[in-house]
Amino acid sequence: MSTVAQKKGFGATLWDYLTTVDHKKIAKLYLIAGGFFFLLGGIEALIIRIQLAVPDNNFVTAGFFNEIITMHGTTMIFLAAMPLLLGFMNAVMPLQIGARDVAFPFVNALGFWLFFFGGVFLNLSWFMGGAPDAGWTSYASLALHSEGHGIDFYVLGLQISGIGTLIGGINFLATIITMRAPGMTYMRMPLFTWTTFVASALILFAFPPLTVGLLLMMFDRIFGTAFFVPSMGGNTIIWEHLFWIFGHPEVYILILPAFGIFSEIFATFSRKRLFGYSSMVFATVLIGFLGFMVWAHHMFTTGLGPIANAIFAVATMAIAVPTGIKIFNWLFTMWGGSLKFTTPMLYAAAFIPSFIMGGVTGVMLASAPADYQYHDSYFVVAHFHYVIVGGVVLAVFAGAHYWWPKMFGKMLNDTLGKVTFWLFLIGFHLTFFIQHFLGLMGMPRRVFTFLPNHGWELGNLISSIGAIFMALGVIVLLYNVVITSIKGEKASADAWGDGRTLEWAIASPPPEYNFKQLPLIRGLDPLWVEKMQGKKEMTPAEPLGDIHMPNRSILPFIISLGLFIAAFGFLHHPDGASWSVPVMIIGGIITFGAMFLRSIIDDHGYHIHKADLMDDDDKKGVEA
Amino acid sequence: MKKWLPKVRLFTLFSFMALLLAGCGEPFVSALSPAGEVAKMQYDLMILATLIMVIVIAVVTIIFVIALVKFRRRKGDENKIPKQVEGNHTLEIIWTVIPILLLLVLAVPTVSATFELADVKAMEEGTRDEDAVVVKVTANLYWWEFEYPDHGIVTAQELVVPTDEKVYFELISSDVKHSFWIPAAGGKLDTNTDNTNKFWLEFNSKSTDEAGGLLYGKCAELCGPSHALMDFKVKPVPRAEFDQWIDKMVVAKDAEHVPANDVAKAGEELFSANGCISCHAINPGEKRPTAPSLANFGDRSSIAGKLEYNKENLKNWLKDPESIKPGNNMTGTYDNKGLSDQDLDALAEYLMGLSVED
């Protein structure tokens, strides 16, 4: 919390956050909401592992188990991993390019609230007749067969939160293209900014197919169309294509920012510039590009024929090359460096072997004929958890420890951080390594139970024990967050002492305008460049002047709330509820009314005056 | 060296090997003990890929460990600034080219196997091999139907196939998407709702014998609450035995089933009175879309694809199907609560007498 917020009452703080358009506060909102959904998804994961700890278990029923796995996957991907990464992007990317905020602060807030209301709507399904139960992929034939409103919650909730993600991505693209500080050329951007840029481009191109798929599914379920009903001329394979044309780039939307986070951490704690920076940028762009060429490897067993399977197999293997380049560049960043093993650096180091495991099984899966065996077995479950947990979640934890001082002004406790790290890492490998073998031994994924004579007992038990370790690790992390916010050690501007990029040039936490004077960028790792020349701070690129700031607004919240309300109307429309259409209209009026207000009310923002800025300097000692 | 150390090493070695052996799973359901040509081909690809990946992992691990150990910041180094290296073109070319070469080693057999496994000319019109066995598989919510179109016979839940020759499959689903997977015999192929998928498998006589003569089949695509329980069995038998079985099934098409005793007779009446007969076929020539054929129920090896084949389990299944396969389509179609123990005995007697084997 900033020092300003602590002085306010709870109501005022709440209002502050409901109306904020400041990227640093929106980042905190993303972190809090994403963290909450991460815990929710984690509890769902624990239920899965308890149910599968022993054969023939009846801890949960078969139907409930399917709801749990569906919500675990959907929550973790859409409501936890992505928002947490978007949180870091919001917190750090504008600072790294020397900007005062993102290009569209209002849209930034709107993106968050849409995601938030979409996520809340999806999770309300637990209390309103049952959660979706067709898997996070929600394949059309099963989704249309599913009774109750679970799938409707899925379709509507993801649609709303998806719009939020999409406009968030567009906003980041515009920010990086237009708002870089003087001297910050593309090839001087930190790797985390680069990966944010490429991931945002992926969001821009990958989310529309999902939007289309969800819309068609919504029409099929709610208005009785037949896009996915073969008996009426529809086709269910279309859903698989639409979903995976989104779904595969989605993996890169998650993993590229994770690569970015680790690139920053490796460089900082090796006290060395990133090895092969330009090839890292090239590899990032190439991975993003190839990410769109390989979606059908999720459909090797759908029966697309040998030509399609062969092409997509080889294309998928090709992705291993740029990924390999990255791995070696990280290794050689450490090589010859001066490695300091803080908590973030431990995560970064552990990421390499963990992610390599996920990467090599990815190449194994690319071999189509062998994939006929792996597909939809626990081998695949092991593979994508190695990628997502071993890559993305480790990156989120690493990023949280690394940027916590910048975001909150206090250092997370390093000892507790290391306890979390070891518990989580051991638990992670214990849980998922054995699952490769379970899959090869014939265990299909998404099974609510298994029979005792199949030879899968030991593997499943080990896996469940591992899950407990992961849970303990997360509990220690939560304790760390609490204890730090109560009595954490205050962080300086360059909190780790070895900061290289711009965010470490300004106070922790930064003032609301970030940079009093925009800095002049004189090379890659701008702060490091200045430090090596014996300076303590950045050279300003402009004289001190008034700073133009955007006004706060409650409208993003209201626009999102309107869609949230309208969604209940859509949800109950197929039941023939008389109030369904009025609710849709009321929700629509709220949303479009708020948009109308936004359009007609002139909002020129306000200025922080030069005199106040000089005053600030004396109080906080803000640099640059 | 201490005396106990070699013993510890030996013990570690043994336990590691035991783990490795146990790691192959049960041969009737494991992809790691291939019982046919397709599974073998896929297994070989797995091994090839694993070997290549072990090389990659080894190289990375060595560099990783050396870097971590050698370059950690030591006392006295607090103010040392390492040389800021931009990159190294030779190294970068090496770690771009070598992975490409390694991938080519994997890509070539991958492409060739992809085409080989998709070769179903022998079942296609025009290039049909009259001797080739073709099975039409229809996946339904939690049960499997196997039709032999060349002979006009239908069975369910237990697939009978000849060994040591290619068996061709034509797959479709009647309700939601499922996936047809016999791990020991080869990889899976989805049963779509839209179109038929075709592929072939081969069942090796020696390996299937070693696996106990009965392989397990699984549904590999989430299809509803009882997805986990949608198993089937595969009984690979020598071609001569297979032909005999086909003949028996064909003969049974024209024969009226006569219950063996009075109890079974009472069961037959209950079977009609409760409306079972309107969904379940009891003639191997009949194909019913709503429920599995019971024409050779007496020859099955499990109840509901899950429980051991005995009278008690059959009675439990009939008494309360929901508790055994949640979400199945039989629940609620008859008055299961109203069936007395005697009724269940009679039904079980009747059903277990439906057999084409001698």
Image (spheres, rainbow, N blue to C red):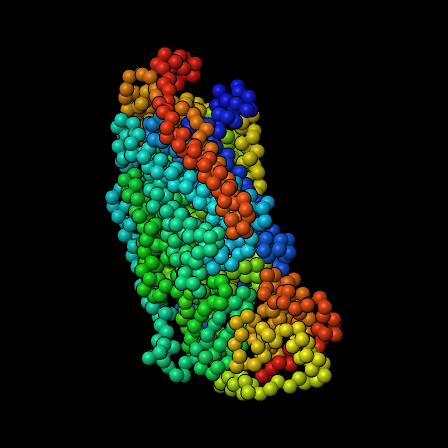
Q: Please, is residue A270 above or below residue A569 in the view?
A: above
Q: Residue at x 58, y 69 (%)?
A: B305
Where is the C terminus of chain B found, in terms of image quarters? bottom right
Q: Nearer the viewer, residue B35 or B160?
A: B160
Q: Residue at x 56, y 29 (%)?
A: A483
* Foreground of the two, A503 or B196: B196
Residue A143 place in picture, x, y as percent: 49, 56
Whether residue B88 can be seen here: yes
Up the image or down, A445 lies above or below A266; here it is below
Q: How many marks?
A: 0
Q: Is residue A447 left or right of residue B307?
A: left
Residue placed at 54% from the left, 61% from the top? B227
Residue A476 lies in quadrant: top right
Q: Position of residue A170 (x, y in %)?
A: 35, 38
Of residue A82 and residue A548, the one placed in the foreground of this image is A548
Q: Position of residue A149 (x, y in %)?
A: 54, 50
Residue B83 is situated, as x and y percent measured from the top left of the image, at: 31, 33
Q: Is residue B165 left or right of residue A534?
A: right
Q: Is residue A332 above or below residue A10?
A: below
Q: Is residue A270 visible?
A: no
Look at 49% across and 46% down and name the residue there: A570
Residue A106 appears left or right of B7: left
Side (left or right) of A88 relative to B255: left
